[in-house]
Amino acid sequence: MANTSLIKLEHDTRIDAAAERLSMTRREFLQFCAALAATLGLPQGADAAVAEAVAAKKRPSVIWLHFQECTGCTESMLRAEHPTLEKLILDVISLDYHETLFAAAGHQVEAARLQAMKENKGKYVLVVEGAIPTKDNGVYCKIGGKTALDLVKECAADAAAVVAIGSCASWGGMPSTSPNPTGASGVAKVLGKPVVTIPGCPPNPYNFLSTVVHFLTFGKLPEIDQLGRPKFAYSRLIHENCERRAHFDAGRFALEFGDEGHRKGYCLYKLGCKGPETYANCSVIQFGDAGASTWPVACGHPCIGCTEQGVGFQKPIHTLAKLKNIEPNIQFPRINEEKGLGANLGSAAVLAAVAGAAAGGAAMAARNLGLSHQAEQMEEARKAGQQAKDSTEV
Ligand code: SF4
Ligand code: SF4
């Protein structure tokens, strides 16, 4: 069926101008807007609204603050693997204050911030990168003589929206790792009100761009979860869409880096993959391009749960993840179970559902996770043999 909304834009010269600005063809530009609309979960026809907004709407003023961080979030935005992404980000916003990117320094830069805040009072978007130290009145991070604590409150007061970019700004991230000597905290906690959070270390630039485009198109931020994360990007577990998931369900795991299971592409759960307790869309859009349309987990590195408060930088990397959702994704093909080796994750889930005891099912699933793995069976057999030998010797 023809997309009537897009047809209306056929002779719109603003679309051509935007495509030219971004060094894209008109077709590429419209395709990219359609992809953005799909990522945001918008209905059919919304791609035209997105294209029109990106091409023609006044770019929102953005004031971007840096606190306790490594600047990896900015690096992630600007060195995006897809060459057009950083261009688009800089095209859809008017970046009026950004310490890392400004050529100016000192008082000039401070004046630019105050001017941008005055000119765009009530309309600018405040983006915060980095955690905010709260101990000892915030003395551990100062810019232009002001603490991060004071600066964020001052800049948030007249902002139309506040976005915490990266895990540090979202909930403390790396600087808040125990014992958290500076009292590093996230923006929402410091401001005492919900903000949009885009956690990740680094965060996915596509999620930031989609959030801004939503703001640009509809004049409001996208729907968020209880942690402030846009639902379009953070409502699914990594584990639900991971290509290794079939191995997880069948109980086939890598036990060591470089072992046979690892080389065969088995599930990385037993190497500490936190995909089962981490909400993010990395597995869907293959964030962290490792080349040739792949992503780090596909390449053999477990997810460390960087988007999840209490997981990334808190749980040791090789600790097993908590299983939050034990039901296999229905999109996956049926799994060939190995015979006679106990319940697998899927059957445990079904049993749990029938018995109405999901917690018990999860425990059973966890207990049975490794039973089908040959190496573990051999280990069990070895232990049993040893015990038998010990008892005969006694
Ligand atoms: S545990 Fe990790 S590697 Fe295994 S299926 Fe889940 S997300 Fe993929
Ligand atoms: S896969 Fe895991 S560790 Fe990697 S970016 Fe996504 S949430 Fe973070």
Image (spheres, rainbow, N blue to C red):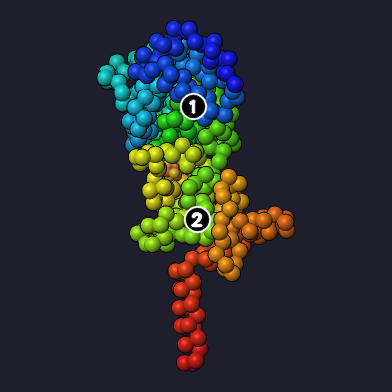
Q: Name above or below for residue 377 compared with residue 233.
A: below
Residue 342 at what x, y percent from top left?
Answer: 60, 67
Report if residue 73 is visible in the image.
yes
Name above or below for residue 328 compared with residue 207: below
Tell me which corner region of the image, top left, top right, bottom left or bottom right, holds residue 102: top left
The residue labelled by disc 1 is 35
- Position of 349 with respect to 80 (left or right) is right
Between the C-alphas of marks 1 and 2, the distance is 30 Å
User: Mark 1 near mark 2, Cβ–Cβ under 8 Å?
Assistant: no
Q: Position of residue 394 (x, y in %)?
A: 49, 92
**Residue found 55% across the figure and 24% down from its top:** 221
Asked if disc 2 is less than 8 Å from ligand 1, the answer is yes
**Disc on res. 168:** none
Circle 1: residue type: Ala
- Residue drawn 59% across the image and 69% down it: 340
The residue where tag 2 is placed is 247
